[in-house]
Image: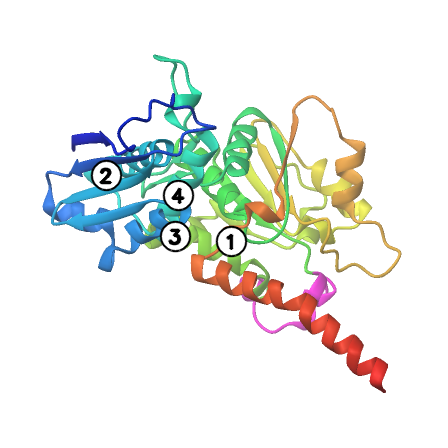
Amino acid sequence: MSTRDIKDLRPSGQTKTMTPETDTATTQIELTFEDNRLASALFGQYGQNLALLERRLGIVAEQRGNQVSISGSRAACEQARRILDDLYARLQRGQDIVSGDVDGAIRQALAQGSLFDFAPGEPRPNFEEINLRKRPVRARTAAQDNYIRTLKRHQLTFGTGPAGTGKTWLAVAYAIQLYERKEVDRIIFTRPAVEAGERLGFLPGDMREKVDPYLRPIFDALSDLMDQRVVARALEDGDIEIAPLAFMRGRTLANAAIILDEAQNTTSMQMKMFLTRLGENSRMIVTGDPTQIDLPAGQISGLSEALRLLQGVEGIGVAAFSAEDVIRHELVSRIVAAYDRAAPARTTRGKEARDKE
C-alpha cells in the first residue's frame, strides 16, 4: 500500500495550528492498494466497509478501482488510513475480514486516539490477540482487550457483563489456545442447568444430548474457532468435555482449561464447590451477567457473592463489560436505537390513554 498524496484543504489565508481538539480543516488522503483482489475485499461488497468508515468517523471515502480518496478532519483521515492499513495487512497474511473486523478496527483506532495524541516515535498500543491454528482472534473493544490481558495474567478469571460482549466467545478462544499449545491436556465446559432445575435425568437421550441445549453457545464458538474434525475427535477422546455443573462435585481438575458459563445462576454452594475443583496447572474462567439471575427469589447468586468475597485475592482477575461493549451488527444497533428513541413516546402515549380512562 502506498499513500499518494496528503492535502490540507483549509481555505487560503488561514494559519490556525492543527490540534486534535481544535482542528476543523478538511484534509484529503489518497491511498493506493497494489493488489486489486485484496483491495476489493478491503473495501467490501458495494463499498460497504468504506461506508461504515464514513458513518463512524465522519469522513468521505471515494473509491476508484484500487484507490480510495479520504477527506475529512485531519485526525479522522489519519484514523481511517490506519484502519485500512491494518485491515489490508490482515488480508495480505491470508486472513478474511468481515464487517465485525472492520467495526473492531474502528473501535481500536478510536480507543488509541489520533496520530497527534502520541509523541513522535512513541509506540502505539495494539489490542491483544489470541493466536489459534484456524485464525487469530483480536479484541474488538477496549473491554475485550482488557479481558484477554486478564485471562493471560491470572489462573482464575471472572468475566462479567451483558450478553453480546464476547466474554464467552473469547473465553473459549483462550481455552483453545492453551490446548493447542499443549499448556493444558483438556478443555472442560460446564454451566448450571437452571432451566431444567438440574434434573437432567428427566430429559431424553444420553448425557451429551441432555447437556447440548444448555451449551449451544459453546459449541458454536468451538465450530467457529477450531476445525470441525478436530472438535469431533477431541470430544470423542475426552479432550473436550461437556458436563453439567453437578458432575463437577468430588473431582480435582488438573492440567485443564475449565469454563463455567452463565455463572450468575449458580448458588453460593455450587460456586464454592466449583472454584475448589481447581487443580495443578489449570486455568478457570467464570463468565456471567450478575444482572440476569434466574434463581428463585431470595436465593443468593454464587457469582455475585464470589465477586464480593474474592475481591483483591492474588491470582484472581476480574474483567467487567458494560452495555456500551455489546457488539452487534450495525443494522441491529440502529434498530435498537430507533426503538430506544421511541420508548419515551410510547410511555407518554400510554400514560395519556390511562388518564383519559
Identify the amino acid type marked 4: Leu
Query: Residue 213: where, in percent of width, then height?
Result: 56, 65
Q: Which of marks 1 and 2 is nearer the N terminus?
A: 2
Whether residue 243 is visible, yes or no, is: yes
As displayed, is residue 63 above or below residue 183? below
As displayed, is residue 169 above or below residue 199? above
**How far is the residue under mark 1 from the one under mark 2?**
30 Å
The residue indicated by pointer 1 is: 218
User: Badge 1, how many Cα within 10 Å: few under 14, some, many 20+?
Assistant: many
Query: Residue 57: where, in percent of width, then height?
Result: 39, 43
Q: Residue 6: which quarter of the image? A: top left
Identify the amino acid type marked 1: Ile
Q: Earlier in the sequence, mark 3 or mark 4?
A: 4
| Residue located 26% across and 34% down the image | 9
- Label 3: which secondary element: helix
The residue indicated by pointer 2 is: 88
- Relative horizontal placement of residue 84, taking residue 270 as reference (left or right): left
- Label 1: which secondary element: helix
- Label 2: which secondary element: helix
**How far is the residue under mark 3 from the one under mark 2?**
22 Å
Identify the amino acid type marked 2: Tyr
**How far is the residue under mark 4 from the one under mark 2?**
18 Å
Mark 2 and mark 4 in contact (Cβ < 8 Å)? Answer: no
- Per the rendering, the mark at residue 57 is 4
Quadrant of the drawing holding the C terminus? bottom right
